[in-house]
Amino acid sequence: MAASKKAVLGPLVGAVDQGTSSTRFLVFNSRTAELLSHHQVEIKQEFPREGWQPEGNHCSLGQDNWRASLQCCGVA
């Protein structure tokens, strides 16, 4: 059944939308640009104080974003 459904849909396009508070993954039909599926994962933000942004945390933030992207792709 999956093969026949894939033949009807044709090629698909996936997109990752990485924002400051969430990661979204969207799946489109490449021929019609119709949105077929999407999933969103919230990103936990931690600040040492109101209005402060922690320094030196870029590697950890990148890993969190990558994990959220993979989680979205698996669900969508």
Image (tube, rainbow, N blue to C red):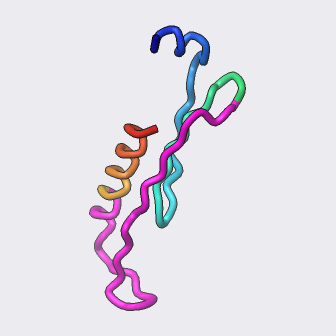
Q: Position of residue 4 (x, y in %)?
A: 52, 9
| Placement of 46 over or under 36, stated as above or below | below
Please tell me whether residue 41 belongs to the stretch shown in magenta: yes
| Placement of 63 over or under 34, stated as above or below | below
Q: Position of residue 55 (x, y in %)?
A: 32, 78
Residue 44 sits in quarter: bottom left
Residue positioned most to the front? 1
Nearer to the camera, 37 or 59: 37
Q: Is residue 1 left or right of residue 34?
A: left
Q: Position of residue 58 (x, y in %)?
A: 33, 66
Nearer to the camera, 1 or 3: 1
| Placement of 46 over or under 39, stated as above or below | below
| Placement of 36 over or under 49, stated as above or below | above
> Residue at 46% of width from left, 11% of height from top?
1
Q: Which residue range is magenta in the image? A: 33-62
Nearer to the camera, 62 or 72: 72
Give the number of marks.
0
Q: Is residue 36 left or right of residue 41?
A: right
> Residue at 30% of width from left, 56% of height from top?
63
Residue 52 sits in quarter: bottom left
Please tell me whether residue 49 belongs to the stretch shown in magenta: yes
> Residue at 46% of width from left, 38% of height from top?
76
Residue 13 sits in quarter: top right
